[in-house]
Image: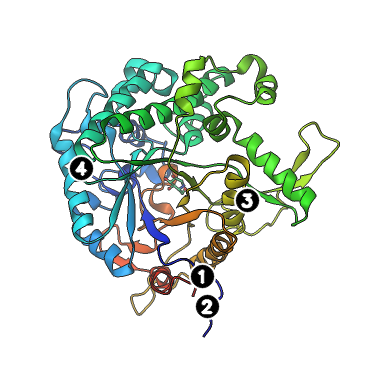
Amino acid sequence: MKDYYTFPKNFLWGAATASYQVEGYPRADGAGISNWDHFAHQPGRIENDHNGDISAAQYLKYKEDVQLMKSIGIKAYRFSISWSRVFPNGTGRINPKGLDYYNKLIDELLANDIQPWVTMFHWDMPQALEDKHGGWRSRKTVDAFGKYVGYVTSQISDRVKNYFTVNEILCFTNLGYELGVFPPGLKLDAKTVNQTVHHGCLAHGMAVQAIRANAKTKPQIGIAENLSSMVPLYETREHIDAARKAFRWNSAPRMTAMMEGAYPAEWLEHIGANAPEFTDEDMKIISSPLDFVGINIYAPTYVKAAPESKLGFAEIPMPEGYPKMNMPWLNIGPNITYWSPRFLKELWNVKGIYVTENGCAAIDKLDHDGKVYDTDRIMYLRNHFISASRAVNEGIPLKGYFVWSLMDNFEWACGYNKRFGIVYVNYQTMERTPKASAEFYRETISRSAVV
Ligand code: NOJ
């Protein structure tokens, strides 16, 4: 049988999770209370009042989970470090026991030939920083983050080479300070919210510098960012150009600033008095050079050319009834895995691109034979892989892919009601069952081709 959708042999196939979503036991071994721990324990914040107290219990079962990864053929594990385990109060006193868990996890991964790819911030931060300084509203939080990242790097960089600074800036700023659905659960004015986004970018830049300054071996540093995934209405020059413009415009206060060292003038004009306060020095930090760019890719936004409009493009509203996976925002659009990497290359000549998350929620059930036949997830992933193969074979420097997620976990405000894993977790027994999608992933990895 001929393989049509191929990948180079050294394409990095990985899986991703985040600390509060999979570990459980967030207060163990001297850890401080995190913002998510605090938030999830407030009645009414999370569906069914779920919380991350036990989660998928990876804190206890990491060895078993490493074996699972190995059996699937996963080459790299993207996980995050919980800041409040290491600095219980955000600053000052270090809790060395907090890092023990990550040291053990890293050692276990390396012993099994799986590369650790570490995210420094995947949304859980010491609640003390929210209480004392107003969280991401304050530069003090940014400074504390830089110190935390520097310390962690000094402790793990003898073994860890690859780092992500922060994960999805808009989610820990807008969702928390504008929409109030994530901690700290506030609905603040636009200027304050824009300031939190600026601080998120600054935290990213500070982390880049802290990692470079403290790493014992030469690090590879990137971010895991969620850009708007723009797709041209159809593939003609005019619509492709429009989608590229839309991609840059929508990334303006984040990726565009990181890549170009400035907020685009037209964006500053657009937000007017709501612009954040910033200095030239901030912009230098934000645009610290990166070794690669990671993008979390889920759902498309369609764009058409609009020569009559000032920006030259128009976003097309989603038709009613557009197909989705099991999540209100998860519209299906697999060609984003081609277009986003292509635009990163065309706009900013990014040389190393990773899909740091891609996956979907599905209504998974154990069948009579004890298996989970998630044909819907296989359909979703398969089509994304085909787009990834297209990118790679056109010479776009897409170097790896991390599926979201290794296993079912705490899906933030949706609690345990949404399952994103390729491995099923029974939350009563903590038993893990690889789904059919895990077998599909294993076959794809072993053949370096979509199966
Ligand atoms: C992106 C986030 O980084 C991750 O934590 C989340 O679970 C997935 N999207 C799915 O919503």
Is residue 417 in view from this perspective?
Answer: yes
Which dot marks residue 445? none
Q: Position of residue 304 (x, y in %)?
A: 77, 47
Instruction: Specify the amino acid type for callout 2.
Output: Asp
Question: Disc 1 versus disc 2: distance between alpha carbons?
Answer: 6 Å
Q: Earlier in the sequence, mark 3 or mark 2?
A: 2
Q: Secondary structure at mark 3?
A: strand
- Residue sitting at 24 percent across and 34 percent down? 152
Q: Nearer the viewer, mark 3 or mark 2?
A: 2
- Which residue in the structure is indicated by mark 2? 3
The relative height of residue 255 versus residue 65 in the rendered view (above or below) is: above
Q: Earlier in the sequence, mark 4 or mark 2?
A: 2
Q: Secondary structure at mark 2?
A: loop
Q: Earlier in the sequence, mark 4 or mark 3?
A: 4
- Which residue in the structure is indicated by mark 4? 158
The relative height of residue 316 versus residue 381 in the rendered view (above or below) is: above
Q: Position of residue 187 (x, y in %)?
A: 52, 24
Q: Are marks 1 and 2 in contact (CB under 8 Å)?
A: yes
Q: Residues within 10 Å of mark 2 (few under 14, many from 20)?
A: few
Question: Disc 4 versus disc 3: distance between alpha carbons?
Answer: 39 Å
Instruction: Specify the amino acid type for callout 4.
Output: Asp
Q: Residues within 10 Å of mark 1 (few under 14, many from 20)?
A: some
Q: Residues within 10 Å of mark 3 (few under 14, many from 20)?
A: many
Q: Position of residue 351 (x, y in %)?
A: 50, 47
Report the label total. 4
Q: Is mark 3 within 8 Å of ligand 1?
A: no
Question: Disc 1 versus disc 4: distance between alpha carbons?
Answer: 34 Å
- Which residue in the structure is indicated by mark 1? 6
Q: Nearer the viewer, residue 160 or 77?
A: 160
